[in-house]
Amino acid sequence: SGGRDVEHATEVISAEIFGIVGFLLYAMTIVEYLVHYRFFDWVYARMLRLKLTDRAQLWLIGALSFLASAIIDNLTATLVMLQIATRFFRGRNLLIAACTIIAAANAGGAPSPIGDVTTIMLWLNGKFTVGQVIGWGTAPALVMFLLSTALLARHIRSDTPDLQEEPVAISRSEWVVIAAAALAFPLPCVFHLLKLQPYMGLMLGFGLLSGMVAFFNYVAPRQTHLSARMDHLLKRVQHDSLLFFAGILLAVGGLRHLGVLSDLSRVVFGEAPGVWRFVAGNTFLGVLSALVDNIPLTAAAVHLLKTTDPAIWVLLAFTVGTGGSFLVFGSAAGVVAMSALPGLTHDVYRKISPVPVAAGYLGGVAVWCLQYLLFR
């Protein structure tokens, strides 16, 4: 019997890992197509034409980070927006922009089923539907973004020169590829509605996109620097991050099988928790995610929370997704930002972000509680 239990647990964990890692792999590769065809360079050129001050640019980049993370996930959105921010800001203003991007990307990913590894995990485990996570999570995430960005923007004291670049010319066929890549991201939601695995939607979108690119390369009169090959784009995906996620899920699966997670659930939430005990516990887990990382916490929380209320699960997605913004190493977005921007150290981040993030975080939790009182 014990052997069969272990075998069943292994099958469940393997299916979970395959679903999440496969989802992330295809999503990251599709984003590489957007980068390869210079879509984000085009976005920068359009922003440059607006001739905004640094404070206005901070709001615009924060808003784009918030919106983009809901579609291409917060980690990728952070990397892309940092590349744009380095062309607009210099010195301390660049560090403030990086802090804003981290907080905005984490907030934007929270109310989207594909915006963060944590929401992907909860969504694939059936804790909420697409409509539920958007309905319950959008207002808290928006409050988190607005409050934190408003307070961070106050640190901007002066304007810095923008990096001037030549206008980006994108051909009609390249726009077709970009549009196909953008349309691939909603496919997981469509497949989920059809009772199919969401990652299969990205597989379909990725396959159609790759076929389209191969066709354009075939009919093109000559090879150019924009001719894309799928194997080259796959090499640019951060495979070490995928292995990290797989290892975390394996470790949490072992703890679950040993019963450690059940004991931890009783400590954090009690034997028969009510709604407000769940609120307090989720708020605590969100703050803890800044120290432990939100991915293992969410993987554990899937088996910690003894509730079927989707609103409670959306609150968890919000708290662990945005709570990592308290520290620069508390979220995947912060870690990649720190590696991409050498000047963004733990001490620098600690002097800029904690108060704005705390204000946004508590404001978001308060808005969720208000929603619960009004609509439950």
Image: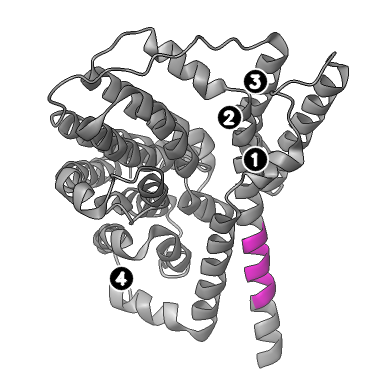
Residue occupying image coordinates x 78% and y 36% = 207
From the viewer's perspective, tell me whether residue 13 is left or right of residue 116.
right
Task: Give x and y (percent) for residue 114.
Answer: 53, 42
Above or below, comparing residue 11 to residue 144 in the picture: below
Q: Is residue 79 magenta?
A: no
Which one is in front in this view, the residue at disc 3 or the one at disc 1? 1
Label 4 to label 1, Cα distance in Å? 39 Å
- From this viewpoint, is residue 201 visible? no
Say whether disc 4 or disc 2 marks the residue closer to the N-terminus.
2
- From this viewpoint, is residue 169 visible? yes
Amino acid type, mark 2: Val
Which one is in front in this view, the residue at disc 4 or the one at disc 1? 1
Amino acid type, mark 3: Ala
- Please tell me whether mark 3 sits on a helix, a strand or a loop: helix
Q: Are marks 4 and 1 in contact (CB under 8 Å)?
A: no
Amino acid type, mark 4: Phe
Residue occupying image coordinates x 59% and y 9% = 169
Which one is in front in this view, the residue at disc 2 or the one at disc 1? 2
Say whether disc 3 or disc 2 marks the residue closer to the N-terminus.
2
Check disc 1: other Cα within 10 Å, few if <14, some if 14-19, many if 20+: many
Question: Relative to the observer, which residue lies in front, 370 or 163?
Answer: 163
Which one is in front in this view, the residue at disc 4 or the one at disc 2? 2
The magenta span reads 10-18
Label 3 to label 2, Cα distance in Å? 13 Å
Label 2 to label 1, Cα distance in Å? 10 Å
Above or below, comparing residue 41 to residue 245 in the picture: above
Check disc 2: other Cα within 10 Å, few if <14, some if 14-19, many if 20+: some
* Residue corresponding to mark 3: 179
Task: Give x and y (percent) for residue 27.
Answer: 61, 41
Mark number displayed over residue 269: 4
